[in-house]
Image: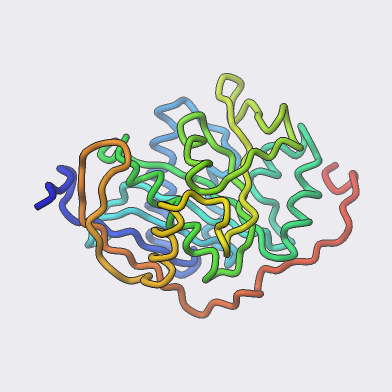
């Protein structure tokens, strides 16, 4: 029998719309801020509480089965025609090309993965980083999102080949920026084939399709980086979802929109 990860033998990965679970959103914010503080990051654009009141935000958390502790998570922020995506806020004044790129993809549903974090207990296991990212891609068909954007750190950019991500080299210095502070390099990525997953690694494609077909199940998962196994209870079924809700036709972009 596979040995369970020492931090817990069973955990849950759960997805929900932010406005449906404010208590967990607050735990997410608290955990994310603790991790940012460790790295001396205080001014990141998504380190706020306003997102938890938006219907265009979905949250994925890695937590204890009883919900008493979060080990990590990520947000899916959808381009809703009202609130700019974090990648727009972070890079737009440096390179306004990002605004038109987001507008183009929003017609068939565009979103950003942001606020990815994990606690020390799961550091290096992929449970707080790769697994939530995989779940986010799986949720794209439920929500009606065909394009994901993200700003990756040097640690998480390695997932792009697994998830079918491409460098958004039209912006920044061939897709890179110093963000959220001058000594940290971020890479802008995007994936615009969330339904077919044609550029996704076959191993990941199979896992993502299984999650789409089986949003509520338990599986013994192995860390991609270490010889650790744990029982993960997936709770990914979303309710009252309109897959066309966030197919947005923006007004034409003008430079004065960012002034």
Q: Nearer the viewer, residue 144 or 38?
A: 144
Q: How is the image coloured?
A: rainbow
Q: Residue furthest top?
A: 183
- Residue 92: x, y in percent? 75, 39
- Residue 203: x, y in percent? 40, 52
Q: Residue furthest bottom?
A: 240
Disc tally is 0
- Residue 9: x, y in percent? 15, 52
- Residue 98: x, y in percent? 76, 43
At 42% from the left and 42% from the top, the residue drawn is 117
At 45% from the left and 50% from the top, the residue drawn is 133
Which image quarter: residue 223? top left
Up-down: is 173 above or below 18? above
Residue 8 left/right relative to 38: left
Which image quarter: residue 93? top right
Q: Residue furthest left?
A: 1
At 47% from the left and 62% from the top, the residue drawn is 138
Quadrant where the C terminus sits is top right
Residue 146 left/right relative to 39: right
At 40% from the left and 44% from the top, the residue drawn is 129
Up-down: is 158 above or below 24? above
Q: Nearer the viewer, residue 166 or 25?
A: 166
Residue 9 left/right relative to 80: left
């Amino acid at each position: 029998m596979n040995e369970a990860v020492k931090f817990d033998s069973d955990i849950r990965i759960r997805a929900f719309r932010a406005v449906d679970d404010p208590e967990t959103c607050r735990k997410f914010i608290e955990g994310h801020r603790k991790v940012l503080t460790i790295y001396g990051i205080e001014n990141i654009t998504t380190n706020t509480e306003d997102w938890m009141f938006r219907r265009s935000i979905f949250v994925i958390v890695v937590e204890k089965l009883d919900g008493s502790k979060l080990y990590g998570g990520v947000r899916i922020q959808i381009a809703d025609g009202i609130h700019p995506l974090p990648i727009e806020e972070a890079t737009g004044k440096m390179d306004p090309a990002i605004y038109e790129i987001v507008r183009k993809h929003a017609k068939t549903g565009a979103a950003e993965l942001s606020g990815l974090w994990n606690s020390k207990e799961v550091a290096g296991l992929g449970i707080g980083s790769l697994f939530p990212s995989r779940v986010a891609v799986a949720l794209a068909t439920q929500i009606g999102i065909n394009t994901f954007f993200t700003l990756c750190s040097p640690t998480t950019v390695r997932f792009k080949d697994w998830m079918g991500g491409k460098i958004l080299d039209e912006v920044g210095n061939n897709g890179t920026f110093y963000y959220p502070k001058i000594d940290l390099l971020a890479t802008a990525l995007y994936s615009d084939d969330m339904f077919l997953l044609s550029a996704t690694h076959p191993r990941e494609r199979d896992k993502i399709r299984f999650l789409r077909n089986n949003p509520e199940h338990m599986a013994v998962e192995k860390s991609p980086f270490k010889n650790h196994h744990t029982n993960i209870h997936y709770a990914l079924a979303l309710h009252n979802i309109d897959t066309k809700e966030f197919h947005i036709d923006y007004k034409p972009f003008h430079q004065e929109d960012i002034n």
